[in-house]
Amino acid sequence: MSEDPVGSSKPMDPFEQFRSMRDAYLDSMAKVMVDAVNTEGYAQATGAMLENTLTVSAPFREAMEKSMLQVLQQLSMPSRQDFSALADRFSNLEMRLDDMDAKLDRIEKQTHAAARTDSKEESATAPDPVLKARAPRRVGTKASAAKKRAAKQAQPNKRTARKAKR
């Protein structure tokens, strides 16, 4: 029975030298490849090959798109163009709704401001509340007529019977 020397706790690995040679080889090849790929000549050669490939494959791609479009039409399924057209229409609708929302907000602010000024004018010209309670109400004042007009304009237009039949 053999005893290990006191200083060596690692067993002997016969493939250790091969691993170190492999690692050195891969490191040197990586450096050479990085230097080769980062040249202008390599970029031009790759660009030329890509351009030629795209030029050669263009007729096949167009034929594939036409046949795919026919298949989609026969299956009553939407195509890419249909989806993009719908997306454009929805974007247009969304923009219009945003514009309408902004206009409605502006109109609402104007009506609230007008209502505040009307109530301030009425409170400034109104007599004492005790006297107002005793005094009979006047029918057909200018302020009530203006309020009626504003209420009528604020209501949406109702369809007539003739328009509803269409």
Image (cartoon, rainbow, N blue to C red):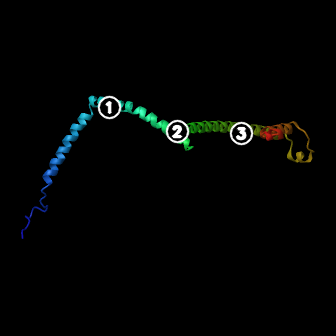
Given this view, does label 2 or label 1 mark the residue nearer the observer? 2
Q: Quadrant of the N terminus?
A: bottom left
> What is the residue that sits farthest to the bottom in this orientation?
1
Residue 12 in the image: above or below residue 41? below
Given this view, does label 2 or label 3 mark the residue nearer the observer? 2
User: In the image, is 153 to the left or to the right of 49?
Assistant: right
Q: Which residue is mark 1?
A: 49
Residue type of the residue flagged with mark 3: Glu
User: In the image, is 100 to the left or to the right of 48?
Assistant: right
The image quarter in which residue 107 lies: top right
Residue occupying the point 27% across, 28% down = 41
Residue at mark 1 to residue at mark 3: CA–CA distance:
64 Å
Residue occupying the point 89% across, 48% down = 133
Which label's residue is closer to the chain start, 2 or 1?
1
Q: Which residue is mark 2?
A: 70
SS for tag 2?
A: helix
Query: Can residue 43 be seen?
Result: yes
Q: Position of residue 104 (x, y in %)?
A: 69, 38
Around disc 3, counting alpha carbons within 10 Å, would you say few (fewer than 14), some (14 to 19), or many (20 or more)? Answer: few
Residue type of the residue flagged with mark 1: Met
Which label's residue is closer to the chain start, 1 or 3?
1
Q: Position of residue 158 (x, y in %)?
A: 80, 41
Residue at mark 2 to residue at mark 1: CA–CA distance:
32 Å
Residue occupying the point 19% across, 41% down = 28
Query: Can residue 78 be seen?
Result: no
